[in-house]
Amino acid sequence: FLGTAGIQTLDGLSIAFASPASMAAAPEETTAKLATLRESTKKADFRGVDVFLSNVWPRGAFRLLDDGAISAELLPDRDLQEVGTEQIAELAALLRPRYHFCGGGGQA
């Protein structure tokens, strides 16, 4: 278990992580960790992270896809506008990951 949110470096690979489900269980701790994450992205030498792991999709991620890029069978049963969270979308924009892996099947 990595925790609610943070950045770890493993053998030179920077890995950021955030779990809204875990964040809801510890809101005060989460607020502090998210503030630390946001501050780390403001440093002059910050160039993004290698990997960002989250258990939900960032809201609006589908906007980056070409029309028809996802087959209809793979789309969620609800409107794409409602899939994911704004919190993860904001973090993804700030962290500028080379790769973002999401779990949770787009739920949130």
Image (cartoon, grey):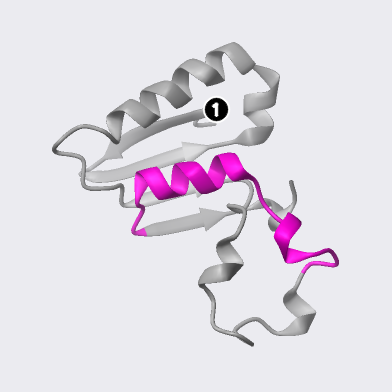
Q: Which residue is mark 1?
A: 4
Furthest-top residue in view? 28
- Is residue 85 covered in magenta? yes
Q: Is residue 90 left or right of residue 7?
A: right
Is 86 positioned to the left or the right of 13 in the image? right
Q: Residue furthest left?
A: 45
> Which residue type does callout 1 highlight?
Thr
- Residue 75 at x, y percent in the picture: 75, 73
Give the magenta-colored segment's residue range: 76-98
Q: Nearer the viewer, residue 28 or 81?
A: 81
Secondary structure under badge 1?
A: loop
Residue in view at x 49 percent, y 30 percent: 5
Query: Quick check: 84 above or below 25?
Result: below
The spot of residue 6 in percent (x, y) is 42, 30
At label 1, counting other C-alpha atoms closer than 10 Å, the crowd grade (few under 14, some 14-19, many 20 or more) is many
**Place of residue 87 in the rendered image (x, y in percent of width and height, measured from the top left):** 57, 39
Residue drawn 42% across and 22% down? 35
Towards the viewer: 42 or 104: 42
Residue most extreme to the right: 77
Q: Is residue 90 magenta?
A: yes
Q: How many circles with numbers are drawn on the protein? A: 1
Q: Quadrant of residue 38?
A: top left
Q: Position of residue 66 (x, y in %)?
A: 54, 83
Q: Quadrant of the N terminus?
A: top right
